[in-house]
Amino acid sequence: MKWILILVSMVGLLLTIVPSILVASGAMTLEQNRLYMAIGTALWFLTCPFWMSAQKNEELKETPQI
């Protein structure tokens, strides 16, 4: 389950970066860019907190207590 969340959030991150490059090169219109970036942003913010908080919790468990 965790790997699916990581994969979906990385796809969302790519959807926020790649369209801007494609617009700059002239391969994509600005309207398409807005759509893909909105989808990518939603994917990133909806999936990322779940797997990042799980990693943080695991790191806290491994940290030795003084």
Image (spheres, helix red, strand yellow):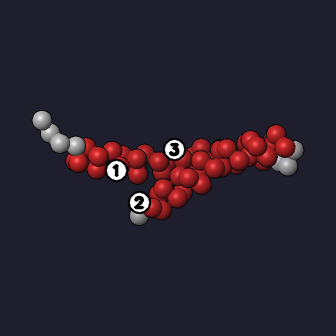
Residue 26 in the image: x percent, y percent?
87, 44
Image-based side of 38 in relation to 66, left or right: right
Q: Furthest residue to the left?
A: 66
Residue 5 in the image: x percent, y percent?
47, 57
Q: How many residues crowd around disc 3 within 10 Å: few (fewer than 14), some, or many (20 or more)?
A: few
Q: Amino acid at mark 1?
A: Ala
Q: Give the Cα separation between the discs numbered 2 and 3.
A: 15 Å
Q: Which residue bears the numbered disc 2?
A: 2
Proximity of marks 2 and 1: CB atoms separated by less than 8 Å: yes
**Mark closer to the observer (3, 1):** 1
Q: Amino acid at mark 3?
A: Phe
Q: Which image quarter holds the C terminus?
A: top left
Q: SS of the residue at dot 1? A: helix
Q: Which residue bears the numbered disc 1?
A: 54
Q: Residue at x 54, y 57 (%)?
A: 8
**Mark closer to the observer (2, 3):** 2
Q: SS of the residue at dot 3? A: helix
Residue 47 in the image: x percent, y percent?
48, 51
Q: Give the Cα separation between the discs numbered 2 and 1.
A: 9 Å
